[in-house]
Amino acid sequence: MVKAIWNGAVIAESDDTVVVEGNHYFPRKDVNPSYLQDSDMSSFCPWKGQASYHTLEVNGQRNVDAAWYYADPKSRAQPIKDRVAFWRGVTIED
């Protein structure tokens, strides 16, 4: 079971992550939505496509744009469609 942990909270937990470029992508259903806030941040990857972001909020603290996902990835990146990955201090335990 792989876990994403930040500020003492388990943000996501799954036995079905997809690893791309060293990042674990968690199925959306295995991410606790109560910790996610929508963000206006976006970025573009030439082979994955347009990424959107979430800010994490746990125990009154915010980690801005610490989660990202590809709602409509390019064909080569279809395995990560609607999966969420983390960075900016989020610990991944497996």
Image (cartoon, grey):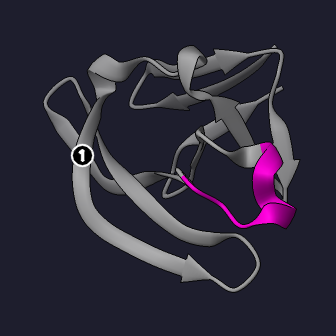
Residue nearer the viewer, 5 or 26: 26
Q: Name the element at disc 1.
A: strand
Residue depicted at x 39% and y 56%: 53
Q: Report whether 7 appears left or right of 57.
A: right
Q: Report whether 78 appears left or right of 68.
A: right
Residue depicted at x 31% and y 26%: 35
Q: Report whether 58 appears left or right of 26.
A: left
- Quarter of the image that includes the N terminus: top right
Where residue 75 sits in the image (x, y, percent)?
80, 63
Q: Is residue 73 magenta?
A: yes
Residue nearer the viewer, 66 or 73: 73
- Quarter of the image that includes the C terminus: top right
Q: Using the rendered view, name the quadrant where residue 33 is placed.
A: top left
Q: Residues within 10 Å of mark 1 (few under 14, many from 20)?
A: few
Q: Which residues are magenta?
A: 72-79
Residue depicted at x 51% and y 51%: 89
**On screen, residue 30 above or below 51:** above
**On screen, residue 72 above or below 17:** below
Where residue 47 sits in the image (x, y, percent)?
76, 78
> What is the total number of numbered labels drawn onto the structure image?
1
Which is the main secondary structure of the residues drawn in magenta?
helix
Residue depicted at x 78% and y 51%: 78
Where residue 52 sits in the image (x, y, percent)?
42, 60
The residue beneath circle 1 is 38
Residue nearer the viewer, 51 or 17: 51
In the current view of this chain or complex, which residue is farthest to the left?
60
Where residue 38 sits in the image (x, y, percent)?
24, 46
